[in-house]
Every structure is written in structure tokens, then in C-alpha cells.
Image: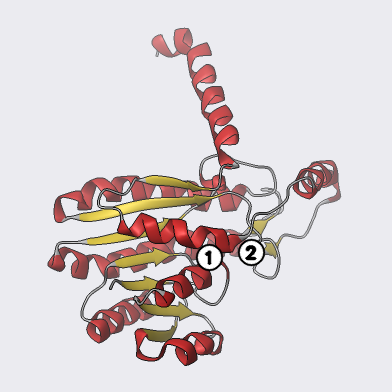
Amino acid sequence: MKTWFITGASRGFGRIWAEAALDRGDRVAATARDPKTLRPLLDAHGDNVLPMQLDVTDRTAVTAAVRQAAETFGRLDVVVNNAGYGLFGMIEETTEEQARAQLDTNLFGPLWVTQAALPYLRAQGSGHILQVSSLGGLAAFPTLGLYNASKWALEGMSEALAQEVAPFGIHVTLVEPGPYGTDWSGASAVHTDPLPAYEPVRAARRAGASARTPQDPRSTAAVVLELVDTDTPPLRLFLGTYPYPIVEAAYRKRLDTWNEGRQLASRA
């Protein structure tokens, strides 16, 4: 039996993974902004669920929620930083409020949860932190600049974190989904006020999105369960095969660009 702490468990990946863990007999501290959305989990699984209201941008509340979960269940085995959303819009269109809110949720939220959980994981000498990143944490796309920024920052923070906590028996995995049929681009999304000058860029992105068929997010549940049961989990794991050619091309382009500038770089 494992004990999970999952943020953003009201829907999407967080809900699916919470249900999968509970269905196999694990215990889950499930958080959401609206605790009423967690009632079905409690009705179905009783004391194996600890539902909690949580806004991950509130550091004090995060610390209290993690403490309550650890004290209720006696330990924490898997910490899933899933809460997040997409900000859609051009860089020029993005307001300061929108930019800060994106980083507060997608970067600082996982930071606060991770900091709150680490003392418990270190004390028990084990634990696995799953940081829900994205294909957008490895390759950048127009209309998603601030979302990309939040996930690229999460990637860098988590790669350093993995090296810092490995001596304590703690694992870190960046889970990087491709396109799935969650409401990430629907009800959860925030949009900037569009500037007409960027309409051709926006139209190209819409055309590309319409050509993709999102995968069923429920197919990820078995993979995540296997991941957390692995003795030596990877630092990074794609969900689905869609990201492979995109990321491979992005990394080849970076290497080519660096090598093209090698002579210039050598004169610095």
C-alpha cells in the first residue's frame, strides 16, 4: 500500500491517477480548489481518501495540507504535483497579472508542495515526487510562451532537485504528456486578449491543433502505477509516443545552432 499526495485531483490526470491508486488499495490525500469535486472519491473509498481544499499558490495552506496528510496516513510515498493550467496567448498580449499567475501555479505551486513534503520523505528515507511537466516543457510553441516558461523552469528545478535528494533515497520523475483529452485547453485554460496583428500565427496554431487526435487520458493510469512501483524510476518519462519526434527534432536543431556558432563562440 502506497500513500499518495495529489494536487489538482478534481479532474484530468490528477483525478484519473487518484482513482487508479485507490482502486488498487492505495491511500490518497487528494486536493482541489473546490473540495465538493472530491466527494465521489470519498463516497467510493472511505478512509483511504483524505479530501482537502487547496490552492497551491498559498504556501501556508500547502504546508498545512502536506502536514495533515502525513499525520493522517503516517507517511507519504508518492507526491504528485499535477495542479496547473495553460495560458494561451502571444507574449506581447500577456498581462503582468496573467504571467505571474501562470508562474505562481505551474512553478511555485510545485515548489511549495515539494518543500513541504521533503522533510517527511527525508525522515523516512524514501519517496517519489512526480512533477507533471509537458511536451511544452521541452519544446516551445507560439501562443504558449508563458506556459512554456513555467514548464521549462519546472524541468530545470526538478533536474537539480533529483540530484539533491538522491542521497536520501528520494526519486524525482518529470512526467511529460503529449496531447490528451483533458480540459487543459478547455475549461481550465486562460486566454489573453488577442491583438489582430497575430491572427495569422493564431490561425496556424488552430489548424495544427485540429489535425491532432487527443489520446484518452485514462490510458496513462496503468503507466503511472507501474512508474511509482519501479525501484529505479527515470528522471523523465513521456506519456504517449507523440512527443518523441517533436523533441528529437527540437534537440537536433539546438545542437545544429550551437555548432553553427562554434567559431564565433570560440572567440569569446
Q: Residue at x 66, y 66 (%)?
A: 183
Please state, as top left, top right, bottom left or bottom right, where the N terminus lies in the image.
bottom left
Within 10 angstroms of label 2, few (less than 14), some, or many (20 or more) residues?
A: some
Q: Quadrant of residue 228?
A: bottom left
Residue 25 versus residue 47 in the image, above or below:
above
Residue at the location (62% across, 59% down)? 86
Please tell me how many numbered marks the rendered image carries. 2
Q: CA distance from mark 2 to mark 1?
A: 8 Å
Q: Amino acid at mark 1?
A: Phe
Is residue 217 visible in the rendered image? The answer is: yes
What's the amino acid at mark 2?
Thr
Q: Is residue 241 placed above or below 186 in the rendered structure?
A: above
Query: What residue sits right under mark 1 in the picture?
Result: 13
Q: Quadrant of residue 223?
A: bottom left
Read off the residue under disc 2.
182
Kind of element beneath mark 1: helix
Q: Position of residue 77 (x, y in %)?
A: 27, 68
